[in-house]
Image (cartoon, rainbow, N blue to C red):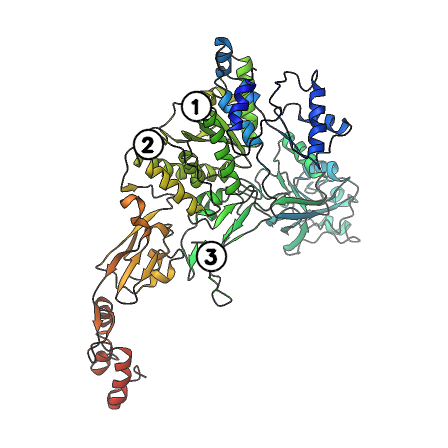
């Protein structure tokens, strides 16, 4: 591939934070013939303290070895070495071939400048970690033959126990490990902390059985095999087995079902139906079924899972922003619904323990969380945020990519967000395919790959920020490693973002899910990446992404409105996944009891202390629905939309949703309650014997007059008045 070093140097010099040092020379065989150049750079950066960036990922291991072998070079602990791929992601593409053939300026320069600039960003701040401890206690679930074979493969480094679910097969003659039989009733937990429960029904107790084989020989029906379990459908109740087992006492046909439970660090499940049905089971649990390749892979991993392990704590949860529940009623359940590991559960019944503490919310189990980030993507309030890395760092990377790309003369940038695992492998495979297969074009010059820990961790705030900062499109590459819940959530969020952009007059398709299973889908992926650009802003925004999701969305919306080709006052949004909207209040039902105000977790609803009014700040509403569920009159309906009247200022100001004249005390004319509320109360109690005459009139009095009337007319006081 051909690199235009002067053009790259010029583009990077305009990008804040990017360095042009080392771009004086372009190397063509740095890992072999020109390795001395790398060693000189390793020495110089070791002395200066600067970090070292190598534009090659294929030979990263070799460069690390060269660094260690270079006298005077700092170790990677003292001075990190970063690697960036500019070959498969750009150099091996049809655009590069066309530029090289025409001998004109390379169309790839803006893209390569963007990739190099982003690779120079400092590493995000480290996040807290979650620790696991495994002593190597492993439970193997399955039939006798398969379980014995797998247990033998694991027995050396691990302490293996076997649970056989049904009769059949053969156990080893030697009683070399704990062996149980029965039906697994529950399995829960994670690496280092699994709890298994099972019930044993068979007359033979394997703990007592000495495997002397006397029962096998004595049974006239052959109902006992070398699994040392009675096949009850074949047994004719001769009980010869009981007689010959008299010394050991392992066989008892009158024994009731016995429940067992035990703790394990690891679980290998050889059964066809897994114990965990979610897309991503807990760490430390491996389900292989009867697939020998999966079994081998699981055994190799299990053998290394003894000791202490750490993983990042991927999320941050701010309870005060959560719109999940109030007063034991559930509102938003987006994070619970999307979690593929079942790591999030409701805590709607929780009461505030101290003054000022809010009740409700959700609980996230960090030991089950695998860091997909989907909870942060669907969270409308920003209570749940992804931390590995956080949105501020992700936003800085996207802005650096787009800024460097624009400074180098690039146009119509499309961000391709993909995972660091399967996604990166597919992108690299497409680049290699374009090198050797003329039918493949490779990543276009305008497509900027963005590897992330998980594709579901970036959502509406970062997508719209990227469009506001000059991107033409945002594409998300999903593979088989992505759960169905993630795909649905991403599609719903993209529909919301697209509705906003289309409503503002930005033509074209700005967001798309690219679904690819593996390398067999490369031709389809190749065609998808050639989609035409969509209309974007005339002037790119310069704002920085904030830690607060709603604040970032406001910045992006303000810029998109200012640049809108066709500004709109009211944009209808899809009901699924919308973080914006208004409330419709039925004035014929609403009594202005204001229970909705106390239920609103985002301060979108408020009262007026001077007169009966229900006020609403649309900017604050997250469409959680708690107000509608709390309303005793069923008078509130949610309406997803983005209201942009008066250049978006109107949605930030309180407006009256409902108001009515106050009811006045029949004694002193002091206003209290509302006419509809008092009338509803009178209607419901008019036939009640306890609320007749003076008692009924007291319902029409304010609190002060009611007390005075009670003492002024003691002969008319009823039990209910007291």
Quick check: 45 above or below 91? below
SS for callout 1: helix
Q: Spatial distance from mark 3 to mark 2, Cα to Cα?
A: 36 Å
Crowding around mark 2 (Cα neighbors within 10 Å: few <14, some 14 to 19, many 20+) is many
The quarter in which the N terminus is drawn is top right
Mark 1 or mark 3, earlier in chain? 3
Residue sitting nearer the eye, 487 or 474: 474
Quickly name the residue at label 1.
Answer: 528
Res 519 seen here: no
Residue 586 percent location from the top left of the image:
24, 56
Quickly name the residue at label 3.
Answer: 320
Mark 1 or mark 2, earlier in chain? 2
- Kindly check if marks 1 and 3 are in contact, taking CB atoms under 8 A apart as contact: no
Q: Nearer the viewer, mark 3 or mark 2?
A: 2
Quick check: 679 above or below 324? below
**Looking at the rendered structure, which numbered label has been put on residue 37?**
none
Crowding around mark 3 (Cα neighbors within 10 Å: few <14, some 14 to 19, many 20+) is some
**Looking at the rendered structure, which numbered label has been put on residue 506?**
2
């Amino acid at each position: 591939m051909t690199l235009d070093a002067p053009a790259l140097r010029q583009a990077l010099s305009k990008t804040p934070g990017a360095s042009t040092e080392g771009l004086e020379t372009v190397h063509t065989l740095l890992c072999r013939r020109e390795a001395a150049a790398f060693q000189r750079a390793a020495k110089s950066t070791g002395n200066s303290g600067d970090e070292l960036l190598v534009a090659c990922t294929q030979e990263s291991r070799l460069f690390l070895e060269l660094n260690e072998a270079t006298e005077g070079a700092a170790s990677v602990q003292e001075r990190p070495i970063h690697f960036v791929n500019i070959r498969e992601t750009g150099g091996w593409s049809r655009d590069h071939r066309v530029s090289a053939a025409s001998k004109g300026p390379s169309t790839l320069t803006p893209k390569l400048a963007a990739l190099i600039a982003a690779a120079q960003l400092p590493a995000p701040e480290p996040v807290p970690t979650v620790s696991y401890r495994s002593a190597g206690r492993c439970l193997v679930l399955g039939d006798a033959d398969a379980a014995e074979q797998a247990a033998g493969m694991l027995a050396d480094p691990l302490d293996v126990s076997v649970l056989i679910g049904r009769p059949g097969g053969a156990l080893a003659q030697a009683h070399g490990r704990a062996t149980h039989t029965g039906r697994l009733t529950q399995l829960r937990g994670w690496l280092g902390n699994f709890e298994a429960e099972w019930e044993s029904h068979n007359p033979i107790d394997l703990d007592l059985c000495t495997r002397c084989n006397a029962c096998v020989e004595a049974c006239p029906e052959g109902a006992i095999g070398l699994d040392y379990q009675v096949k009850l459908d074949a047994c004719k109740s001769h009980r010869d087995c009981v007689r010959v087992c008299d010394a050991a006492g392992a066989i008892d046909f009158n024994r009731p079902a016995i429940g067992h439970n035990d703790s394990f660090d690891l679980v290998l499940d050889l059964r066809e139906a897994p114990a965990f049905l979610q897309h991503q089971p807990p760490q430390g649990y491996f389900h292989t079924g009867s697939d020998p390749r999966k079994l081998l892979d699981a055994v190799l991993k299990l053998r290394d899972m003894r000791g202490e392990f750490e993983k990042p704590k991927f999320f941050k949860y701010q309870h005060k922003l959560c719109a999940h529940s109030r007063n034991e009623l559930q509102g938003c359940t987006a994070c619970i619904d999307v979690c593929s590991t079942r790591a999030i559960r409701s805590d709607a019944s929780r009461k505030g323990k101290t003054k000022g503490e809010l009740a409700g919310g959700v609980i996230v189990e960090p030991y089950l969380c695998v860091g997909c980030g989907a909870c942060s993507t669907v969270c409308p309030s920003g209570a749940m945020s992804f931390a590995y890395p956080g949105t501020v760092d992700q936003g800085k990377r996207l802005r650096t990519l787009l800024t460097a790309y624009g400074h180098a003369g690039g146009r119509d940038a499309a961000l391709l967000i993909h995972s660091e695992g399967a996604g990166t492998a597919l992108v690299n495979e497409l680049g290699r395919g374009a090198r050797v297969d003329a039918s493949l074009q490779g990543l276009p010059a305008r497509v900027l790959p963005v590897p992330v820990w998980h594709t579901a961790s970036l959502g509406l705030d970062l997508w719209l920020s990227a469009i506001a900062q000059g991107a033409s499109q945002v594409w998300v590459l999903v593979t088989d490693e992505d759960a169905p819940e993630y795909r649905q959530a991403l599609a719903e969020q993209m529909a919301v973002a697209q509705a906003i952009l289309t409503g503002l007059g930005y033509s074209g398709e700005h967001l798309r899910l690219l679904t690819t299973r593996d390398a067999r889908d490369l031709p389809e992926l190749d065609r998808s990446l050639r989609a035409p650009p969509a209309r974007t802003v005339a002037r790119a925004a310069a704002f920085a992404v904030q830690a607060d999701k709603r604040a970032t969305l406001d910045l992006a919306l303000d810029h998109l409105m200012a640049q809108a080709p066709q500004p709109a006052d009211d944009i209808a949004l899809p009901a699924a996944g919308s973080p914006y909207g208004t409330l419709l209040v039925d004035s014929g039902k609403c009594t202005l009891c204001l229970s909705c105000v106390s239920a609103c977790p985002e301060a979108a609803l408020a009262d007026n202390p001077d007169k009966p009014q229900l006020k609403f700040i649309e900017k604050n509403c997250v469409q959680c629905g708690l107000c509608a569920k709390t309303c005793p009159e069923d008078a509130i309906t949610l309406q997803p939309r983005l209201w942009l009247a008066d250049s978006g200022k109107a949605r930030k100001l309180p407006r009256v949703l409902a108001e009515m004249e106050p009811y006045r005390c029949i004694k002193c004319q002091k206003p209290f309650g509302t006419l509809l509320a008092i009338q509803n109360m009178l209607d419901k109690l008019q036939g009640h014997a306890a609320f007749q005459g003076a008692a009924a009139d007291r319902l029409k009095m304010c609190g002060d007059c009611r007390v005075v009337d009670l003492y002024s007319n003691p002969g008319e006081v009823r039990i209910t008045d007291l």
